Image (cartoon, rainbow, N blue to C red):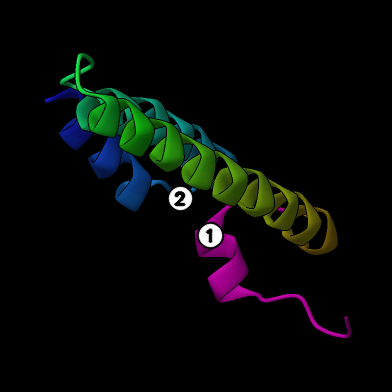
């Protein structure tokens, strides 16, 4: 239920910073879901790999969000779509 709620927040967020927060919540929850059988080495390895991939992807996304937000002067997706920045 928590993972589904985080995914719903991720796809319905208008604010890019809030979208990033939901991304990180799904990162932690996916780590917990993948590593559910912690007594299995393969499960622990897969969970660690999922955590690393989504964490680095999230950091790259955060950099992009900050750059776009600073250039556009807004972090709202609806405002970016309505009036995209030009001349960059």
The residue lying toward the viewer, choosing from 28 and 82, is 28
Residue at 57% across / 45% down in the picture? Answer: 58
Q: How crowded is mark 1: few (under 14 residues within 10 Å), some or many (20 or more)?
A: some
**Pointers 1 and 2 in contact (CB under 8 A)?**
yes
- In percent of width and height, residue 54 lies at 48, 44
Q: In the image, residue 13 lies at what x, y percent?
A: 40, 46
Position of the N terminus, as image quadrant, is top left
- Mark 2 residue element: loop
Instruction: Point out the image quarter for the C terminus.
Output: bottom right
SS assignment at label 1? helix
**Left or right of 5, for residue 66:** right
Query: In the rendered image, is residue 75 in sight?
Result: no
User: In this picture, is 73 found above or below 38?
Assistant: below
Front position in the image: 15 or 19: 19
The residue tagged 1 is 77
Q: Mark 2 points at which residue?
A: 14
Left or right position of 30 against 57? left
The part of the chain drawn in magenta is: 74-88
């Amino acid at each position: 239920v928590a993972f589904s709620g985080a995914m719903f927040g991720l796809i319905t967020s208008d604010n890019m910073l809030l979208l990033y927060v939901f991304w990180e919540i799904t990162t932690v929850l996916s780590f917990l879901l993948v590593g559910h059988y912690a007594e299995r080495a393969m499960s622990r390895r897969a969970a660690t790999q999922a955590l690393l991939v989504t964490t680095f992807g999230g950091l790259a996304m955060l950099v992009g969000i900050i750059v776009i937000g600073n250039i556009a002067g807004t972090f709202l997706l609806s405002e970016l779509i309505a009036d995209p920045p030009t001349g960059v």
